[in-house]
Image (cartoon, coloured by chain):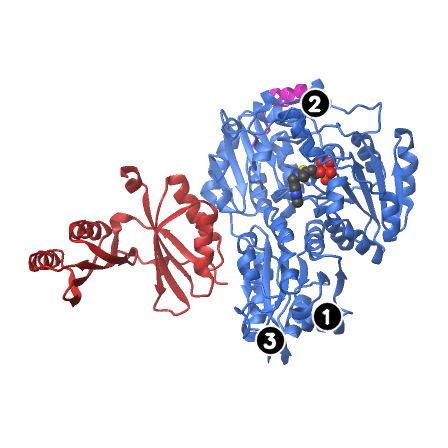
Chain colours: A red, B blue
Amino acid sequence: MEKEKKDRFLLSMLVNNEAGVLTRISGLFARRGFNIASLSVGETENPDISRMTIMATGDDYFKEQVVLQLEKLQDVRIVELMDMDDTVMRELLLVKVRVDDQTSRSQILEAVSIFRAKVIDLTPVSLTVEITGETVKLSAFIEYLAPYGISELCRTGVTAIGRGNNILSKKYNKEEN
Amino acid sequence: MKLTGAQIVIEILCEQGVDTVFGYPGGTVLNIYDELYKSSGRIKHYITCHEQGAAHAADGYARSTGKTGVVFATSGPGATNLVTGLATAYLDSTPVVAITGNVACPPIGRDSFQEVDICGVTMPITKHNYIVKDVTRLAHVVREAFRIARRGRPGPVLIDIPKDVQVAECEFEPAAAPVAKEEKEVDSTSLKKAVKLIKDAKKPFIYFGGGVVISDASKELIRFAEKIGAPMGSSMMGLSAVPNKHPLFLGMTGMHGRFAASKVLSESDLIIAVGTRFSDRATGNKLQFSKNRRVLHIDIDPAEIGKNIPVYVSLVGDVKQALNLLLASDIKHTAQSWHDEGEAIKNMPDSHLTMDMSRLNPQAVIEAVRKRTADDTVVATDVGQHQMWAAQYYHFGNPRTFVTSGGLGTMGFGMGAAIGACVGTGKRTVLFTSDGSFHMNMNELATAVTNNLPLVVILLDNNALGMVRQWQTMFFDNRYSHTTLSRQTNYAKLAEAFGAAGLCLTDKKDIDAILDKAFEVDGPVLVHVKIDSDEMVLPMIPPGGTINDIITKN
Ligand SMILES: Cc1ncc(C[n+]2csc(CCOP(=O)(O)OP(=O)(O)O)c2C)c(N)n1
């Protein structure tokens, strides 16, 4: 587990917003035996381009290979191995907890406020919370809620952006096809 | 000018300088074939017996000429029949553009008749692929496909065009023929490091691969080797890049390479690897390969640097350009002692293995064939022992004359590839095959006959899947599980039935007479050569082994 954390790395990519791009990228990971921990993708300010953030694990050899192989894909415009210290990372979590008694409900609401989360749905027997933050924070929140009984949860996977002048599209130097 | 999608495809092929296409028609490519009919003066189409043969033909055409091979197929089974051919081209970095039809856009995704998601199927075995659903994008895509197939490390690209897109019309702007490929410049700091590395070396060894052939860099490589006085060895894919008779060329290294080449490599302190990817067949034990020596890797594909072998310095870029830069540097010739060491190894008995000459054997046949061919004769092979014997005993003269499936090792590649090479060069072409591989795609003999191609097929019949049998002999205590073929095929008669000439060679004293006859035939001829089932490919460095494990006799 410790080793796994150490080997975590984050890739940001600008890719053509075209059908099949996701398959090409996930296929490349699968084919070369690279594991994806999380993947998030969405259109950018330029509708022709999507930005993809992939969290994966692997040693230095592996990291380097992933980047080089991804760069060979025609639809990938730029890949960057993010410097974790110079990157802001966020993930969104939606979690539904069973609550049938008043005590648990108020304990959870207290945690919600401490974790700066937000209640987005409430029924007599359940409570749904939205929280954004770094992966560790989300995991801590989940761990806290677990004893109350989580009925379902979903996370978006990490999305990340460089700090300050560290702008991905500026580094985009691959020749235009 | 308004054109249909099908017309646009033909116009761009002409614009790209394509005058030869291999393929097989069907329902969803009818419109393209109709335009081909109308443009028959500009593009010659060869119909094969099977789409696999067409894909291999496009590949063989590309390997032997340096041009881009083009293949057409219909949707569904036509497209899936291309798969092995595309994978073969992909692993050996051959520029091929495959154009398939597909069902019209509206029924796509409904499992319509002969509908296959060929883009999904070929994603891992093409450099890139497209399905074009909008006719206004078609011209751009076809042009880009040709560019991608050739640029950098070449490879196959597939374009899937639904039937309605072939019929739809749009405005078409003709464009000029593409200029020669422009590649990224080699980085100057790396160049300095490379020069220093070579200067520091006392025993440099040049190990080159197919990249030298692809980049047309043979002359530069030879001049470089002569400049620094380094012995050379090659991977199988590199073989034809340097004439066998060049005094610095020791031959193929690796599993079935020459003793001298592998031995001198193992004595070197620097490997200058040029246009190669260090396949496990070529390196043997990877740890030992780069132990006690440094590696300078020159290749156009940055992803190959450090992938299989740790590299000390790398030059990423076109091999020809990189070699020219090194040629312009002030690197000196290495000391005479290294040359002498190499010569001593070259004179060791293990460097001169020959087969048992008391009987009809592959070496004698291959050498006799070589006496009847020119330096520019293309030699294609299938896969197995005969392929290795051809690599070992056919002494190549010119680049692009060895057409063989290295990376994928595709049995059945030979017939189609030889046809493509024969069409591409317009010259007599030789195919070395064997009973196993020949039975896979022998149908293409009919294609050779239809087009009266001067193709000499040398079938080295050992009544076995020889290469597999050899492994069973060496590593499975002679348990010949399903490798004894016992085919009752009368090959000479079969050739005649196809309309080719057929000859049979069973006695070593007839080699010259029979081959003389074969090389006089105008059109395709098959020579059935009966050899012993236990003939071995030697030397052999077992998988994962080193020069110390080399096996030189049965
Ligand atoms: C399509 C395919 N199937 C199976 C193999 C595995 N294989 C490698 S060599 C070989 C034997 C080839 O036999 P043959 O063509 O008779 O050549 P020989 O070794 O006898 O010269 C086989 C089966 C392969 N390379 N390609």
Pointer 1: what residue? B36
Residue at 73%, 41% (x, y): give it.
Answer: B436
Q: Is residue A103 left or right of residue B313?
A: left
Same chain, marks 2 and 3? yes
Q: Is residue A23 left or right of residue B454?
A: left
Pointer 3: what residue? B164
Same chain, marks 2 and 1? yes
Same chain, marks 1 and 3? yes
Q: Amino acid at mark 1?
A: Leu
> Magenta segment: does it hold B223?
no
Main SS of the magenta segment?
helix
Please tell me whether mark 2 sits on a helix, a strand or a loop. helix
Q: Chain of mark 1?
A: B
Residue B249 % position (x, y):
68, 31
Residue A164 % position (x, y):
25, 57
Tell me which corner region of the image, top left, top right, bottom left or bottom right, holds residue B268: top right
Query: Magenta part of the protein: which range?
Result: B331-347
Mark yes or no: residue B451 visible: no
Residue at 53%, 69% (x, y): give it.
Answer: B110
Q: Amino acid at mark 2?
A: Ser
Pointer 2: what residue? B351
